[in-house]
Image (cartoon, rainbow, N blue to C red):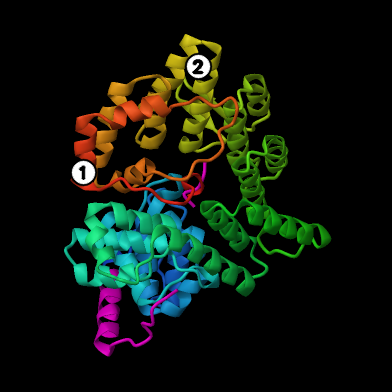
Amino acid sequence: MKRSVMTRSNRSAVIPCRMLAQLVLATAFAVALQGCSTSEPFRDDAAGWQQRFRADFPNKDKTAAARDLTVIAARWPDRISQYSDVEIAYLFNGGGYTPAEPQVQFDLLRQLYAAHWTWRCGVQPSPFWLKFVELLVDRGDLKLARDVVRLIRGSRDVLILRVDKRYATIAAADPSFPTVEQAAIQNIDAARAAVQRCPRRMSETVRLLQAMLVAGHDDDVLEVAAECLDRLARNPHSYDDATLYLNSLLDERASAFVALGRWTEAEQAYGLAVRVNEYGRPNVSQRLNFADFLIRMGRVNDTESDLAAAKFAVNFQTDRFQGVSQYGALVFAQVKLQEALRLNDHAAEELTFAYIKKHRETSHSLYRYALLLTHRTDEYARALIADLRDPLRRADTLVGLQNYKDLPKPPGSIDLGPETKAAMQRPEVQQAIREVGSIQSFDVFDAYW
């Protein structure tokens, strides 16, 4: 369950009429939104709009909260720094609920861009600028899209701009635009600088570890993680956000051991990670990661023991789950599917595959993986073509098809190379790829995006 989990050009000069346009837009939003989501009156000032955002944010549909933040960004851009990276991300990805409507996302991104928004500690929110470019291209505003591209430096986002035909010409037009490999190194440098600027934020150290994993600097990951853990042991209050990010730091440390093929140490590291709470609740993400690691090691019985200790439940027959997100339930189903295949339990195989297929809209990549696991090559090819042709799924699909540096394979992993190669060589699949992008080779590791 890797997260898809990111310098700036000088745009300090703001044209007065542009500021006026922002205020007009914000006023229009204020009029349109009076009474839309809460019945209580609110003051038309920064505090009032912040109060409205806090009231709307818990809603399952994030559209109202995104509109609130759009007004705040337009009228009080200096207040944007008060909102966390996670809160803003939820407006676009939903955080398990419904993301804001596309037009509302566009309006918010336009105002965040005008406000010179960055993540805390000065890191550019590259994935959001990529989303903004996508929406600008859809609207035919290539001039502004080229300006926004200059802020995109996340290695995964750079890759998308290079392999997706919708954006390839925009990236090619900028001679300073980095290669994926250059971006990977730049991400490490930017993350190191953010750690120095914000030494009390473990989240920035986690971001640094993730950047190092992409570039293959696995020994550096272990060194930085060890320093971080030692500091925490000496002073439990040395980080402001350790309760939120310690589990992620331990997970990245385990990933480094996997990348180095140090299986025993990886198992010990995962075993430590699962004992740390996740956002104050029993750990689900790392336990699923640990189970996935164990099953790839061929340790079916140990996987059962690990999942038996989990504080969540998924019933594939009644389609109910608790203590886990829908995506987490799908990852759990994928682990149970691999178990069933190793145990030749055909009933369990059909049950778990049917569950993954039913919920494939939650993760098309997990669905395609399940198709390969169960030797449904024809269905895999059809699903792959459909994902390439869907504008919303195309970029992620192309990312998954590129050629990357190989990680060591756990001794019990299933080799899907022949299945994948057979599907990729089909003429209809090759044609679908040529229509929307290209397949290239990159000297980075994709498993850590």
Residue 405 within the segment the image draws in magenta: no
| Residue in the foreground of this view, choosing between 408 and 397 | 408
The magenta region covers 1-30
The residue lying at 70 percent from left, 63 percent from top is: 239
The residue lying at 23 percent from left, 53 percent from top is: 165
Instruction: State the SS at label 2.
Output: helix
The residue lying at 81 percent from left, 57 percent from top is: 233
Please provide percent x and percent y for residue 143.
21, 72
Q: Is residue 133 left or right of residue 268?
A: left
Instruction: State the SS at label 1.
Output: helix
The residue lying at 24 percent from left, 35 percent from top is: 385
| Residue in the foreground of this view, choosing between 39 and 286 | 286
Q: Is residue 267 positioned above or below 143 on the image?
A: above
- Mark 1 Cα shell of 10 Å, populated few (<14), some (14-19), many (≥20): few
Please provide percent x and percent y for residue 249.
64, 52
What amino acid is found at the position of numbered circle 2 in the picture?
Leu
Say which mark, if any, is on residue 341.
2
